[in-house]
């Protein structure tokens, strides 16, 4: 029995090591072109090596080249990073859109006298600005002196001249000032007396945020300018642009009039807001003919 097993094993090894000759000849002339001397063992070894090499090459191509994108289940290289980047930008734009929409809605309420300026400022800061109570904002000695110096400079016309040169606004209209800016009386504008049907121009390039009728201000228009600047034009007779329109500096946006319950005669009520705060338009514009 054991001898039979050894014989079978010996025959198997012999089959593996038996040499064969592979000839390639010309069928017409019977001329020998090529010949190979081989055995079964060599065929098995070389076949295994070739298969292994093909597997390695295929794996490398799939793992490290764009060819893998043609295989179902694989994504384009860098697509995941692009998707994440777009998601972050989308979230940022949604947040900014919500902020602007809230700001516009609150500003509309101020125009309609539904809320006061203090309530508007409080609501906006409470929702979008860090609570200052959590920060140490107590002014030091140098800070107080600087604040006082800045306040003193605001009183002089040279400040207005610097602002006019810096911002390079154009007058929305020209005429006589009938009511000045007074923050204590909550009059955040200057009123310019005009004749009916005077063209009202945009002071700078921008996009129209609001263009509609309000009970107190009549036909009003609000423009957002670069640099977080907003200009407001009230008591118009007719509006020539709608919300969402892009306007250029000097473009006629409305026709002056005497609309709204708070208007006592033909004039333009003009407000200028910078960084969310009302400023005196006379520091930036002259309104002189």
Image (cartoon, rainbow, N blue to C red):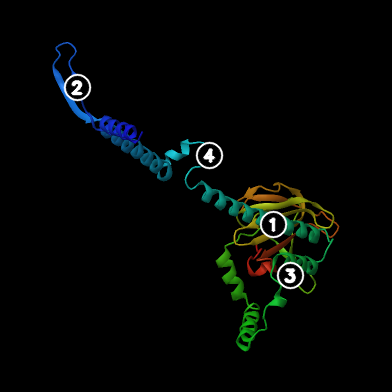
Q: Earlier in the sequence, mark 1 or mark 2?
A: 2
x and y, in percent, of residue 10 in the image: 28, 33
Q: Residues within 10 Å of mark 3 (few under 14, many from 20)?
A: some
Q: Residues within 10 Å of mark 4 (few under 14, many from 20)?
A: few
For the residues bearing labels 1 and 2, Cβ distance under 8 angstroms: no
Q: Earlier in the sequence, mark 4 or mark 2?
A: 2
Report, in whole angstroms, how far the alpha carbon at label 3 lies from the one at label 4.
Answer: 66 Å
Q: Residue at x 27, y 32 (%)?
A: 16
SS at badge 3: loop
SS at badge 4: loop
Residue where numbered disc 1 is placed = 100
Label 2 vs label 3, nearer the camera: 2
Label 4 vs label 2, nearer the camera: 2
Q: Residue at x 67, y 83 (%)?
A: 138
Q: Earlier in the sequence, mark 1 or mark 3?
A: 1
Q: Residues within 10 Å of mark 1 (few under 14, many from 20)?
A: few
| Front residue (pair 69, 287) | 69
Q: Which quarter shows the C terminus?
A: bottom right
Label 1 vs label 2, nearer the camera: 2
Report, in whole angstroms, how far the alpha carbon at label 4 lies from the one at label 2.
Answer: 47 Å
SS at badge 1: helix
Report, in whole angstroms, how far the alpha carbon at label 1 lies from the one at label 2.
Answer: 85 Å
Above or below for 44 versus 179? above
Residue where numbered disc 3 is placed = 181
Residue where numbered disc 4 is placed = 73
């Amino acid at each position: 029995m054991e001898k039979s097993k050894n014989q079978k094993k010996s025959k198997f090894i012999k089959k593996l090591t038996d040499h064969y000759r592979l000839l390639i000849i010309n069928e017409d002339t019977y001329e020998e072109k090529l010949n190979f001397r081989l055995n079964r063992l060599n065929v098995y070894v070389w076949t295994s090596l070739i298969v292994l090499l093909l597997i390695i090459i295929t794996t490398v191509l799939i793992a490290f080249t764009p060819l893998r994108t043609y295989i179902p289940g694989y994504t384009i290289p860098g697509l995941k990073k692009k998707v994440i980047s777009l998601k972050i930008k989308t979230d940022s734009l949604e947040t900014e859109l919500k902020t602007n929409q809230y700001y516009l809605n609150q500003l509309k309420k101020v125009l309609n006298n539904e809320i006061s300026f203090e309530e508007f400022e409080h609501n906006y800061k409470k929702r979008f600005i860090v609570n200052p109570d959590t920060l140490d904002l107590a002014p030091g000695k140098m800070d107080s002196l600087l604040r006082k110096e800045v306040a003193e400079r605001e009183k002089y016309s040279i400040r207005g001249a610097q602002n006019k040169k810096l911002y390079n606004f154009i007058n929305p209209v020209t005429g006589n000032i009938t009511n000045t800016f007074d923050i204590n009386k909550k009059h955040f504008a200057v009123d310019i007396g005009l004749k009916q049907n005077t063209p009202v121009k945009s002071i700078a390039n921008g996009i129209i945020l609001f263009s509609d009728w309000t009970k107190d201000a009549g036909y009003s228009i609000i423009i957002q300018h670069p640099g977080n600047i907003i200009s407001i034009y009230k008591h118009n007779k007719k509006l020539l642009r709608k919300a969402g329109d892009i306007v250029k500096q000097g473009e006629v946006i409305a026709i002056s009039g005497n609309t709204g319950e708070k208007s006592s005669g033909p004039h333009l009520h003009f407000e200028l807001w910078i960084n969310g705060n009302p400023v005196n338009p006379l520091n930036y514009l002259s309104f002189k003919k």
